[in-house]
Amino acid sequence: MISAADVEAAAATLAGVARRTDLVTNERLSALVGASVLLKREDLQPVRSYKLRGAYHLMSHLSDAERAAGVVCASAGNHGQGVAYACAHLGIRGRIFCPTTTPRQKRDRMRALGGEWVELVFVGNTYDEAATASHREAERTGAVPVPAFDDLRTIAGQGTVAAEIVDQLGRAPDVLLVPVGGGGLLAGCLTWMAERYPQTRVVGVEPAGAASMQAALAAGQPVPLDEFDTFADGVAVRTAGSLTFPIIQRIGCDWATVPEGQICTEMLDLYQVDGVIAEPAGALASSALRSQVRVGAGDLVVAIVSGGNNDVSRYSEIIERSLVFEGRKHYFLVAFPQEPGAFRRFLNDILGPDDDITMFEYVKRNNRETGPALVGIELGHPDDLPALLARMEASPLQIEPIDPNSPFYRYVV
């Protein structure tokens, strides 16, 4: 276990290295929940995430012999950037193992931050596969592992976020929303808050497709998730940390689980309304205020924006997931008769005045009587869906809705 004093010692180590990131009031979220909501902008760190705190704190305490042996780590991108930054600034060579799904933007940033001091190795499709490979590399070469979350030095460094928030506010927040992957940030923040300001309500927020810490708490130990969504790559950890878990289990906190589509909606609002470029993990904590977390009127609420390493090429997927989650976008298989005017009748008889065709693609052409087509429809408002379905039911056309949770949907859309 670590103590609040360990977190405070880490803060001293990080002084002049990690940025004292902005803590800003968010009017949109404050109006939404009827409380004062502030965002802790860890996306403004030199590596655009809080991961610098844990990685640098650990590596700064290595002995001369350990520094000479070099370091190795696994990362989906954010921790790797922290390690790369520390390698370049401390003069330590490192190898960073990343899943092949790591966005290109994060790959490029790791190389830019680490320069000649780091080498990237891509293996597997998930963080856990990359972590296994990094462990083998450490055993083979004697390099020092720098865990993304499962090391007490890493946990202490990441816990400095909580101490910094209180120092900036001049008081403790009533509610602190913390995004959770392997649990390093939550374990560090809980440790410090429980000792210094136990009255603060801490809420761990996980994505629905990768809620590994809540699964561990339910099982009494870390367990691998059977089903796993890597969309929120910064927190997509199949198995919770073996060191972070007992800390979180012992201290305890509230929990929220957020669907990936809701995270996308919050990402878009952060960008379009607030001018904040957040990655999925970075929008996770504040997204819970939409429906999962209730706060009292007048509460002082802080949500940690954990990272801003988002690849702009992902925004088309983000928009798609958001529209589907909000019930504004739907897909159908429509069997069109192969005769003139069939598509026009579909537009006139089925589409509402505010509906729009966003996709039309024939999926089969070898039947002369009908031509099945995949049709995407964006509604003017989610409440328009029942009327649309009623018009489809009354139509002579054969129309089949596609369930967003079905394998067929993931294949064709």
Image (cartoon, rainbow, N blue to C red):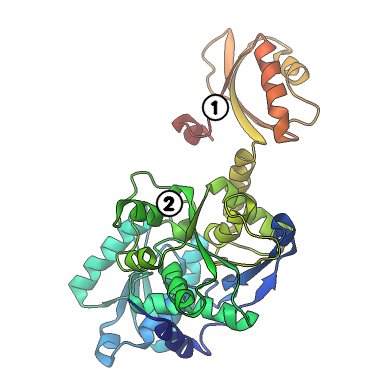
- Would you place residue 173 above or below residue 59 in this image? above
From the viewer's perspective, is 101 left or right of 304?
left
Which of the two residues, 248 or 94, is positioned nearer the viewer here?
248
Which of the two residues, 132 or 5, is positioned nearer the viewer here?
5
From the viewer's perspective, is 330 left or right of 343?
left
Secondary element under disc 2, as helix, strand or loop, is helix
Which of the two residues, 106 or 51, is positioned nearer the viewer here?
51
Estimate the x, y position of residue 61 in percent, counting from the top left.
34, 88
- The answer to whether residue 235 shows anywhere in this view is yes
Q: Residue at x 48, y 86 (%)?
A: 11
Badge 1 crowding class, 10 Å Cα cut-off, few under 14, some 14 to 19, many 20 or more, is many
From the viewer's perspective, is 115 left or right of 398?
left
Estimate the x, y position of residue 403 in percent, counting from the top left.
53, 29
- The answer to whether residue 116 shows anywhere in this view is no
Q: Earlier in the sequence, mark 1 or mark 2?
A: 2
Quarter-of-image position of residue 57: bottom left
Of circles 1 and 2, the one toward us is: 2
Q: Residue at x 38, y 54 (%)?
A: 212
The Cα atoms of the two marked residues, 1 and 2, are separated by: 24 Å
Q: Amino acid at mark 2?
A: Ala
Q: Amino acid at mark 1?
A: Ile
- Would you place residue 161 above or below residue 213 in this image? below
Q: Quadrant of the C terminus?
A: top right
Q: Residue at x 69, y 55 (%)?
A: 269
Residue underneath mark 1: 402
Q: Residue at x 36, y 51 (%)?
A: 215
Residue underneath mark 2: 210
